[in-house]
Amino acid sequence: MRWTLKPKPSHKKVTSLASELNVSELIATLLVQRGIESFDQARQFFRPSLADLHDPYLMKDMDKAVHRIETAIANGENILVFGDYDVDGTTAVSLMSSYLKSYYPNVATYIPDRYDEGYGISYKGIDFADDNEFTLIIALDCGIKSIDHIAYAQEKSIDFIICDHHRPGDRLPAAVAVLDPKRQDCNYPYDELCGCGVGFKLVQALAHNRNQTIDDLLIYLDLVATAIAADIVPMTGENRVLAKFGLEVINTNPRPGINALIKGLKKKSLTITDVVFIIAPRINAAGRIKHGNEAVALLTEYDLDQAEQFASEIEQHNSDRKDLDKQITIEALDQIEINEETDKFTTVVYNENWHKGVIGIVASRLTETYYRPTLVFTKSGDKLAASARSVKDFDVYNALEACAEHLEQFGGHMYAAGMTLKEENYKNFKNAFEKVVSETIHPDLLTPEISIDAEINLDDIDDKLIRILNQFEPFGPQNMTPVFMTKGVKDSGYAKQLGKEEEHLKLFVKQNNSQGFGAIGFGHGDKLELVNNKQPFDAVYCIDENEFNGNVSIQLRLKDLR
């Protein structure tokens, strides 16, 4: 691991902000690192308000989208709400369809089959709309590159409204309205919304026409917060506001579907991390193992007993998903070792029998193991489909764009993408991808980095610090949980390994004569020798509150030690 201590911000800025807010210089440093340099910015950060949300009509084509929906309702048209099969897509479809159905009955939903139709808008979906007399399709979390599909729909007199957040290509599809804050000609003040977030802005605009306020839309924010957490978009600006208030809904009055997923958890309140690791994988499991329709059915169900039945089925899908991704990861690691491809700049593996629903998870696992831009391919119909994952600070989308001549289609983000290609192009693409990455990636990026916010002493950790750090939540990209480094700490002599394979490390640390703290190092069981016999070591960690038998204590969650 590379330990990188963030540069200290301007001392003048830090002392000025510390004085203005009456906080320690440590807290002021953490805030300035996050771009917060004034009292007003700090107020917005610590006290996010729904009043901070932007006017939805600032988004390009919003007026056209609203007008087309209102026209459809006035004319009694059938509206089809179409979305991707992942968390962002299924929450967006659940949000849009349940809002429209609250005052208009002619609304149905459509999630493409991951295996039969693949990602995004499909010809089969358009044919379904045509066969069932839908004249308007609202596409969420997809569509920004579906130029041919939209043209096909036009031939059938079906209009499209696109709500997407992926990067557009050179041309935009000829839809009635294209809502995407990443459009070059869109001046919307915040361009990091997820697909469900863009859908919510459309709902906000529709609500304005019905004299509804933001308070009337609070019931939908559990869906938006779940999508923000799952899609790993920056936890800044509007995302931070929507996530904060969405978490409040999840913890106080969640919809029956989400309530059924979290029922039985012993935690008093869930954090964004809990949404990422508890709620999101289960919603995703439906589309991975069975069909995304099951996730929409769960999230739009108002009867708690029925929701619990749906949740039980999805829990089984999640269990199956875990077994599959574990097995495929083992097979993929074996393939890399057998082919002696551990010294390359990329990891690209293929097996026609791998389950398409879990190749994204396997790509993440391989990235953790070899720390390289990674692609995992499987057979999908007469083509190969792949999921891509990247390492910190390397744009895998740009790398794929440079290899586009070998691809049928691709789309995604800097760190995660998907693509399809013809089987005969696999080898050429694999070589081209390796060449592009080897020529463009900085060698440092091939070693995992721990970015450290500040070096502190254990004596700096007290209840006031914890109280203020808790107000930094919700955490996420560009507002990650603060990471600290402390030098010269020692275990008190009770260090031990935990876990079935002794893979974790538990200790109690002190620095000089400071107060001591319990510490846990997940995956660091092999470092027991390093801390034995009260040998001094340096530690990098996050500060957690550990709840056990009703007692809360400060605990250091070790990220690395040396």
Image (tube, rainbow, N blue to C red):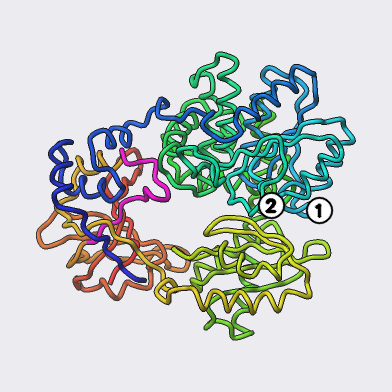
Secondary structure beneath dot 2 equals helix
Which numbered dot is residue 116?
Answer: 1
Amino acid type of the residue that numbered disc 2 sits on in the rendered structure: Arg
- Pointers 2 and 1 in contact (C-beta within 8 Å): no
Three-letter amino acid code at the position of disc 1: Asp
Quarter of the image where one finds residue 331? bottom right
> In this image, 160 relative to 418: left or right?
right
Q: Residue at x 57, y 32 (%)?
A: 200
Secondary structure mainly formed by the magenta segment: loop
Residue 147, percent across and down?
Answer: 73, 49
Look at 51% across and 78% down and name the residue there.
Answer: 439
Is residue 474 found inside the magenta-colored segment of the image? yes
* Front of the two marks 2 and 1: 1
Asked whether 36 falls inside the magenta stretch, the response is no
Query: For the residue carrying disc 2, how many other residues have a C-alpha within 10 Å: few (<14), some (14-19), or many (20+)?
Result: many
Give the class, few, some or many, for how many residues have Cα within 10 Å of label 1's Cα (few <14, many ≥20). few
